[in-house]
Image (cartoon, rainbow, N blue to C red):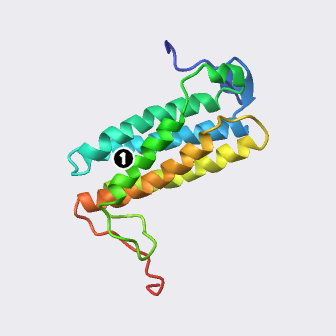
Amino acid sequence: MVRINRVYTKTGDDGTTGLVGGERAPKDHPRIEAYGTVDELNAAIGMVVAALAGSAAGPTLGPMLTRVQNELFNLGAELATPDAVRRARQPAVAQRHVERLESEMDQLNDELPELRSFVLPGGGEVSARLHVARTVCRRAERRTLALGRTDGIPELAVVYLNRLSDALFVWGRWAAKAEGQPEPLWEPEKT
């Protein structure tokens, strides 16, 4: 059970933050960068969920993205836990989460036209927000990889983030189609 009675503690005024297990780390430590970027990704997805209200893409994407937000919170907690033994007792991103992303991505991708160029972010508000979330996801993946070079990370963290960024790309394309928005494509000669 999580209880948050007071938001500010003043313990971070010295430039450190508490990790799961009680250890403190500088706020610019690679572990904080990794789970902080996962938190930023979760906020970006929250903006997509808010934009889905009244959207033709909402009934399909809303439940998927809300589930992903919970999975990202689990991943963030894993990344905030340096002790592998303690981390093993927490809710975690599992292979089934990766497989579900793949299944949902494949299902929606089958409804899309074949790509003949790179997609430019756009295609309506929901699609554009999904592309922003995709880029934040790629940064979370890079930050997690950087942490893994010096510290332990959850086994599936990078795999999950890699697959999620692919899913966000497909979902962005699908949202544009569902909303009847043109999908902007890269035209290299149009500069």
What's the residue at 49%, 12% (across, down)?
1
- Picture layout, residue 52 above or below residue 7: below
- The image quarter containing residue 174 is bottom left
- Please give left or right for residue 95 compared with residue 70 in the image: right
What's the residue at 31%, 41% (across, down)?
62
Between 15 and 56, which is closer to the camera in this rendering? Answer: 56
- Picture layout, residue 66 above or below residue 184: above
- Please give left or right for residue 85 compared with residue 164 in the image: right
- The image quarter containing residue 173 is bottom left
Between 128 and 163, which is closer to the camera in this rendering? Answer: 163
Query: Where's residue 145, x and y in %?
Result: 69, 46
What's the residue at 61%, 36% (across, down)?
35
Query: Where's residue 161, x and y in %?
Result: 55, 46
What's the residue at 47%, 43% (across, down)?
99
User: Looking at the picture, which amino acid does disc 1 mark?
Assistant: Val
Quick check: can you spot residue 127?
A: no
Residue under label 1, please give it.
48
Quick check: can you spot residue 122?
A: yes
Query: Where's residue 79, x and y in %?
Result: 63, 32
